[in-house]
Amino acid sequence: MLVSNVKGVEECDGYPLQLEIEEMRTEETEFNAFVHRMLPKVRYDALRIAAAAAGCDLPEALDATDEDALRRVHTALCDVHVVKGALVCPKSGRRFPINNGIPNMLLHEDEV
């Protein structure tokens, strides 16, 4: 989902969108095994980049048997909420604003 759909930007050039955070909040949730089941669906390289922008340190390579690493992934996925900021296309520089935790990915007419 962290890819730019702006006309003229190839998927490999517009991925992953860079996360810029103006305001965020954290809510600690109980760790559970669902994180382990989510891992095959997550592009870990993109998660590491986004987590770093939020101040979460994830290991370079994920060992699914390492409970500490899984807890840090859980924090990045479940506990960190970006309230205000932007997702920025690395190719075009197009900014997609995030307000009240919701990214606005709508394109302008000339970008379709």
Image: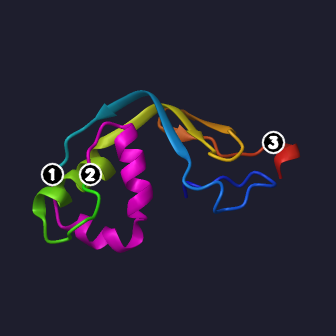
Comes first in the chain, label 1 or label 2: 1
**Amino acid type of the residue that numbered disc 2 sits on in the rendered structure:** Leu
Q: Where is residue 111 in the image (x, y as percent from the top left)?
A: 82, 47
In the picture of the structure, the residue carrying the numbered disc 3 is 108
Q: Callout 1: helix, strand or loop?
A: loop
**Amino acid type of the residue that numbered disc 1 sits on in the rendered structure:** Glu
Residue at 76% over, 45% down? 107
Report how many numbered discs are placed on residues in the image. Answer: 3
* C-alpha separation, residue under disc 1 versus residue under disc 3: 40 Å
Locate residue 24: give its quadrant. top left
Residue at 56% over, 48% down? 17
**Amino acid type of the residue that numbered disc 3 sits on in the rendered structure:** His
Q: Is residue 1 left or right of residue 53?
A: right
Q: Position of residue 6 (x, y in %)?
A: 75, 51
Magenta-tinted stretch: 30-57
Q: Is residue 25 left or right of residue 15?
A: left
Q: Is residue 56 left or right of residue 92?
A: left
Point out the image quarter for the N terminus: bottom right
Callout 1: 10 Å neighbours few (<14), some, many (20+)? Answer: few
- Label the magenta part by its dominant secondary structure: helix
Comes first in the chain, label 1 or label 3: 1
Callout 2: 10 Å neighbours few (<14), some, many (20+)? Answer: many
Report the coloring of the rendering: rainbow
Q: In this rendering, which labeled residue sits more in front, label 2 or label 3?
A: 2
Q: Residue 58 carries which label?
A: 2
Q: Residue 30 carries which label?
A: 1
Q: Callout 3: helix, strand or loop?
A: loop
